[in-house]
Amino acid sequence: MARPITVIDLFAGCGGMSRGFKDAAGYQPVMAVEWDLSAAATYEANFGKGHMRWGDIAEIKDEEIPDADVIIGGPPCQGFSNLGSRDVNDPRNKLWKQYIRFVLQARPMVFVIENVDRFIGSSEFALLRQETQPGGLLEEYTLSHSLLLATDFGAPQRRKRAIVIGSRIGRIGMPFATHEPSELLGLKPWRTVRDAIADLPPVPATTELPDHREEFFGKQVPGIFNSSHLHLGRTPTALSLERYHHIPPGGGRFDLPDHLLPRCWREKKSGTTDVMGRMRWDRPSLTIRTEFFKPEKGQYLHPQWDPSNQENSINRPITHREAARLQTFPDDFVWCGSKIDIAKQIGNAVPPILAEAIARHIKPYIQRALRPRRSPGAAEEAASDAA
């Protein structure tokens, strides 16, 4: 039997990318690195103890980095994102250099970088490409890159991500889409919000996580929580409920009457079109970010809406469990941390189903490279030895 393909997951978060590689079968994690305690605890609760390193990636010594066939992960994206600082000197942008250090030390056959779409146009990406030129640190690697839409690979969410594949075993292109919106190409139809969350209870039973704690890395961390624990409601004010009821599927703050508009929205006549938005049942959601539990941050209201009867509408933001489903985390995934911690883990994660598509795509290239090559005349020698 072929040996497992070994993987290092950097900036691993809660393990969305690792879960996708695990689901692709044949991959074995040998190291993961994450600085956030709750996220590192979630990773360890799902993938086992022993290979997660909680802490600053820069403090891991070269000699502590194991050999690996694949390195996956993406440095923190806030420096590239439209939602964060665009300062090229943002220290978070420099963490990609740590990624390169691991590549140089572990010498994987393939590495995969995931980031926000702006990464492709960043100075960091330009420098990364420069290092693959003759004389560069990564001259033995060939890069492929593209913007992939998670919806095209089975996620019920329009999440666009920059994917970079580096290979020293021959150029590896991008995976082909498996889903499409039009069904003209014979692919599976895009999955929708209905596909992901329609079976979940419309009224959450609680607003709080259970009072559980467990020790990870010598620290007490809230958890371990299963997926049902994450179906958490909120307690909106009467004013918020009235606002929610005015928002139709696909609508947003521009559907509110003037007397329900806060001053900041009344004075801002353009932009931020998806805030206070309601999802549509039969379309994918927009990107699930880290504050999906706040309707004022995006299109996060539950899609159920009846304009004639408020009791038939579900006037609340999506729950943590619904957000995890939209990110394609399976129900057997468990979680650690506070409500805010877990929301960040969900919103920052790579959708496992997108990671799985990438893992399945690169696996044949790696397996071919791992296959023992028989030298000329080896068959004759083996036959002679057998005789």
Image (cartoon, rainbow, N blue to C red):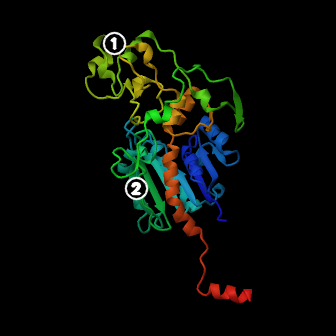
Q: Residues within 10 Å of mark 2 (few under 14, many from 20)?
A: some
Left or right for 65, reference 284: right
Give percent across and percent down for residue 246.
35, 17
Can you tell which quarter of the image residue 49 is in?
Answer: top right
Residue 153 visible in the snapshot: yes
State the SS at label 2: strand
Q: Is residue 276 above or below residue 154?
A: above
Q: CA distance from mark 1 to mark 2?
A: 45 Å
Q: Earlier in the sequence, mark 1 or mark 2?
A: 2
Give percent across and percent down for residue 267.
27, 18
Q: Mark 1, mark 2: which one is toward the viewer?
A: 1
Which residue lies at the image location 46% right of the left edge and 45% below the top edge? 154
According to the picture, the residue beneath numbered tag 1 turns out to be 260
Figure disc tally: 2
According to the picture, the residue beneath numbered tag 2 turns out to be 145
For the N terminus, the image quarter is bottom right
Can you tell which quarter of the image residue 258 is in?
Answer: top left
Give percent across and percent down for residue 93.
45, 45
Residue 74 visible in the snapshot: no
Give percent across and percent down for residue 36.
59, 37
Front residue of this view, candidates 161 and 205 = 205
Looking at the rendered structure, which numbered label has been put on residue 169? none
For the C terminus, the image quarter is bottom right
Which residue lies at the image location 68% right of the left edge and 87% below the top edge? 383
Which residue lies at the image location 46% right of the left edge and 57% below the top edge? 165
Q: Is residue 273 above or below residue 307?
A: below
Left or right for 142, reference 254: right
Q: Amino acid at mark 1?
A: Leu
Which residue lies at the image location 38% right of the left edge and 23% below the top edge? 276
